[in-house]
Amino acid sequence: MKVRKAVIPAAGLGTRFLPATKALAKEMFPIIDKPTIQYIVEEARKSGIEDILVVTGKGKRPIEDHFDSVPELEQNLTAKGKTGLLKLVQQTTDINLYFIRQSHPRGLGDAVLMAKDFVGNEPFVVMLGDDIMEDKVPLTKQLIDRYEETHASTLAVMKVPHDEVDKYGIIDPVTETKPGLFDVNQFVEKPDVDKAPSDLAIIGRYLLTPEIFDMLETQKPGAGNEIQLTDAIDRLNQIQRVFAHEFKGERFDVGYKFGYLKTSIQFGLKHPEVSAELKDYIKELAKKLN
Ligand code: G1P
């Protein structure tokens, strides 16, 4: 069955960015000139996804507004002949987005469970907004290609520094069945550094079969007393195979302050409007710091 649907959980409170997130959804923070969630939506679109459900919460209305059309703005840009800007504005509305509110966030697993009716009986992807991925083939498309070979759930994983494994879901790989594709013995959410089965961390892209909802409906709270998607995936793996696909591209974690700053700089260095100035600025700054 074709993979057509994606779920983007965006109900988090964004406490790592307080006070900025008091009134502004972290998904709307721009990297140069584009909100972080737009990078995720663009990856979905490039991967052939047709419908996206965004799981939102309090204060997330600007996300809906961002992906809605703004006729007055479009008329204004047309009248002024600003066709480049008009195109940028119109590009934000050419995918089907649906929204559902999670009134009592109880963890990532709980957020994904909100998508049960939207997903129905189809395979689907979960895309976390804190991770922007870059590769020749979009990571979501890589997972879809794997699914087309295996018809099984497949999570994206990546090697992380050993002292950071307690921030992630970690896999216990058994064998590399095909290059970059692992059979998995166990999925563990945020293990202690000395107990982690490997340094292969789940990054924010999951291709899941609909049976995950049976697991989520009965999932008990785990790490941080939250309903963890990783725990439900571990149980799914007992009844049908769940693979891990190793991502070899670049991952930009915008979910914490320094990661957000680094991503802004790296994307700025590639942005035609600011890259030359930014390069000069960094060189000047480096001289001063030496
Ligand atoms: C979530 C998942 C975790 C995963 C991580 C990737 O954790 O629960 O398994 O490794 O995203 O970014 P969070 O970052 O929400 O604590």
Image (spheres, grey):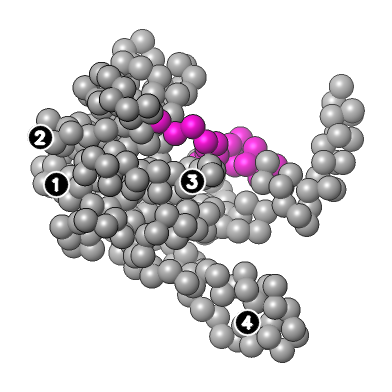
Does the residue at mark 4 contact the one at mark 2 (Cβ under 8 Å)? no
Residue 150 locus on image (x, y percent): 23, 40
The residue that label 2 is drawn on is 239
Local crowd size for mark 4, using a 10 Å CA cut-off: few (<14), some (14–19), many (≥20)? few
Which segment did they paint magenta? 246-265
Residue 137 disc label: 3
Earlier sequence position, callout 4 versus callout 3? 4
Taking depth in this image into account, of 36 and 107 the one nearest to the observer is 36
Q: Above or below — where is 210 with respect to 165? A: below
Mark 3 to mark 1 CA distance (whole Å): 27 Å
Query: In the image, is residue 43 part of the stretch drawn in magenta?
Result: no
Residue 279 locus on image (x, y percent): 82, 41
Does the residue at mark 2 contact the one at mark 1 (Cβ under 8 Å)? yes
Can see residue 235?
no
Does the residue at mark 4 contact the one at mark 3 (Cβ under 8 Å)? no
Residue beneath the point at 27% across and 42% down = 149
Please, what is the three-letter code of the amino acid marked with disc 2?
A: Ile
Mark 3 to mark 2 CA distance (whole Å): 30 Å
Q: Nearer the viewer, mark 3 or mark 2?
A: 3
Residue 64 locus on image (x, y percent): 44, 69
The residue that label 1 is drawn on is 211
Q: Is residue 253 left or right of residue 32?
A: left
Mark 1 to mark 4 CA distance (whole Å): 44 Å
The residue that label 4 is drawn on is 73
Earlier sequence position, callout 3 versus callout 1? 3
Q: Quadrant of the N terminus?
A: bottom left
Earlier sequence position, callout 4 versus callout 2? 4
Local crowd size for mark 2, using a 10 Å CA cut-off: few (<14), some (14–19), many (≥20)? few
Residue beneath the point at 28% across and 25% down = 177
Mark 4 to mark 3 CA distance (whole Å): 33 Å
Please, what is the three-letter code of the amino acid marked with disc 4?
A: Leu
